[in-house]
């Protein structure tokens, strides 16, 4: 009885319509938010995968380049060792030969500089090799 009285009241009916409309609006907003969030996540994952793909291609190119250089070093290594052994056997150092720390530092710096320089690249001015 009280329920039928409430349902026939136009203000209660209006309040019910407003509550149902707000609930529907809230549900629609929640669904749109969920769809937008999942779309943004998919786009982010796609961008991450594209970035990974680009990095892996770059690394693959670098690995090919490194393998080419290693192959070159593998073919040159026996020649270097052979030349070194020839020099050692033809010109042995005396037993009292001593390299002081300054000269050793200079030799290491020259070796590092020559190994970082590209082949065919000339030495910069002012860094001419000097024997101390």
Image (cartoon, rainbow, N blue to C red):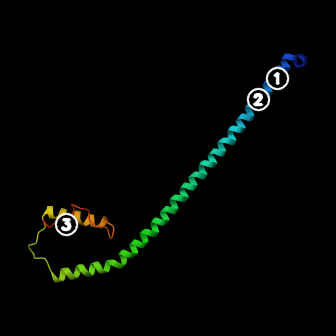
Say if 72 sits above or below 19 in the image: below
Q: Residue 40 at x, y = what percent? A: 63, 44
User: In whole angstroms, how far apart are the C-alphas of marks 2 and 3?
Assistant: 84 Å
Which mark is first along the chain, 3 or 2? 2
> How many marks on residues?
3
Badge 2 element = helix
Q: Residue at x 51, y 58 (%)?
A: 55
Which mark is first along the chain, 2 or 1? 1
Q: Residue furthest left?
A: 96
Q: Residue 70 at x, y = what percent? A: 39, 72
Tell me the crowding category of disc 3: few under 14, some 14 to 19, or many 20 or more residues within 10 angstroms, Cα based.
few
Q: Residue at x 51, y 61 (%)?
A: 56
Tell me the crowding category of disc 2: few under 14, some 14 to 19, or many 20 or more residues within 10 angstroms, Cα based.
few
Indicate which disc residue 129 carries: 3
In this figure, which residue is indicated by the disc labeled 2? 23
Indicate which disc residue 113 carries: none
Which mark is first along the chain, 1 or 3? 1
Residue 84 in which image quadrant: bottom left
Q: Residue 98 at x, y = what percent? A: 11, 69
């Amino acid at each position: 009885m009280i329920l039928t009285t409430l349902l026939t009241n136009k203000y209660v009916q209006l309040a019910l319509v407003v509550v149902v409309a707000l609930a529907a609006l809230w549900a629609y907003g929640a669904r749109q938010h969920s769809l937008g969030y999942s779309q943004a996540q998919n786009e982010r994952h796609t961008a991450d995968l594209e970035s990974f793909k680009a990095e892996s291609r770059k690394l693959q190119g670098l690995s090919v380049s490194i393998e080419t250089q290693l192959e070159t070093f593998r073919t040159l290594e026996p020649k270097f060792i052979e030349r070194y052994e020839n020099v050692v056997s033809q010109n042995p150092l005396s037993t009292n030969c001593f390299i002081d720390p300054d000269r050793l530092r200079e030799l290491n710096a020259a070796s590092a500089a020559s190994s970082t320089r590209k082949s065919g690249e000339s030495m910069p001015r002012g860094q001419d090799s000097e024997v101390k």
